């Protein structure tokens, strides 16, 4: 009898804790979920993409050879763009990523070099961190990356949106992003269709821009649903 009573109590607690969560997740799904739109007119899309890059002074970004930043106060990066290397710091770990050949990367714990399975795991984790965290910093400059497809989507307000799909590269190829632009072509937000997110079509802001030392324009904050993504301590140089 005691076992059955305990089982009922446990079951009641589980239902009490999980049911509101399930209902809330269901509400979010039906409120925000959108099917991936179909982009058209790739020639016009490329014109819009170039307008977007011009609004951001793409040349200044291209001439930027070094970027450092902090992602959500969790991970710190020193990215040597011209040398295609990036030093990633988090907790007690440090990984020197060779972006041309991951096999040449090196991992450290408390500044001691580690190899073998642990070293490979740390390198893999650092590469995934870099792919994600750098995208939130420089995504607008990656719309012509190798393996991308671009199309025009008509938004609800009648404006043109730029749909960019990454067919290869990165950690999760196949992801798509629908850029919303202001009248000058500068990004104000994008919607996301990514395998890492349970809801398709979520919108994230791209409004908190700073012009850095090299002239490159980079964001400092994104808002997505009830969450914020902070990018701080941004420094750039030629």
Image (spheres, rainbow, N blue to C red):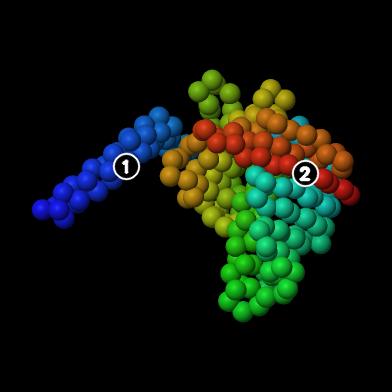
Q: Residue at x 28, y 45 (%)?
A: 14
87 or 40: which is nearer to us? 87
Left or right: residue 213 compared with residue 17: right
Question: Is any atom of residue 190 visible in this view?
Answer: no
Count neighbours of disc 1 (C-alpha within 10 A) and say few if under 14, some if 14 to 19, many if 20 or more: few
Q: Is residue 44 above or below residue 3?
A: above
Q: Secondary structure at mark 2?
A: strand
Mark on residue 233?
2
Tell me where residue 33 sits by quadrant. Answer: top left
3D distance between C-alphas at marks 2 and 1: 39 Å
Residue 215 visible in the snapshot = yes
Sequence order check, earlier mark of 2 and 1: 1
Using the image as rendered, state which of residue 182 and residue 1 is in the foreground.
1
Name the mark on residue 195. Answer: none
Closer to viewer: mark 2 or mark 1: 1
Most extreme residue toward the bottom, as rendered?
Answer: 116
| Residue lying at 68% horizontally and 30% vertically, measured from the top left | 207
x, y (%) of residue 143?
Answer: 66, 44
Q: Position of residue 9 (x, y in %)?
A: 22, 46
Q: Position of residue 210 (x, y in %)?
A: 78, 34
Horizontally, residue 29 falls left or right of residue 222, namely left
Give the residue number, with chain letter if any, for mark 1: 18
Q: Which percent across, then down, holds residue 160? A: 59, 28
């Amino acid at each position: 009898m005691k076992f059955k009573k305990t089982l009922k109590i446990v079951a009641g607690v589980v239902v009490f804790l999980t049911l509101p969560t399930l209902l809330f997740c269901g509400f979010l799904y039906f409120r925000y979920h959108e099917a991936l739109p179909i982009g058209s007119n790739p020639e016009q899309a490329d014109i819009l993409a170039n307008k977007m890059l011009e609004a951001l002074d793409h040349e200044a970004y291209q001439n930027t050879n070094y970027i450092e930043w902090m992602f959500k106060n969790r991970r710190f990066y020193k990215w040597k763009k011209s040398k295609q290397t990036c030093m990633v710091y988090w907790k007690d770990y440090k990984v020197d990523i060779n972006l041309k050949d991951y096999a040449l990367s090196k991992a450290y714990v408390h500044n001691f070099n580690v190899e073998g399975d642990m070293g490979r795991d740390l390198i893999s984790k650092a590469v995934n961190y870099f792919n994600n965290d750098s995208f939130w910093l420089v995504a607008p400059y990656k719309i012509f990356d190798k393996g991308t497809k671009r199309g025009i989507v008509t938004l609800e307000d009648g404006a043109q949106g730029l749909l960019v799909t990454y067919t290869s590269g990165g950690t999760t190829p196949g992801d798509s992003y629908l850029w919303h632009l202001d009248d000058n072509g500068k990004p104000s937000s994008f919607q996301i269709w990514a395998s890492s997110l349970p809801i398709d079509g979520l919108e994230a802001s791209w409004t908190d821009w700073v012009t850095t030392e090299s002239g490159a324009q980079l964001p400092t904050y994104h808002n997505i649903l009830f969450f914020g993504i902070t990018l701080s301590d941004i420094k750039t140089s030629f």
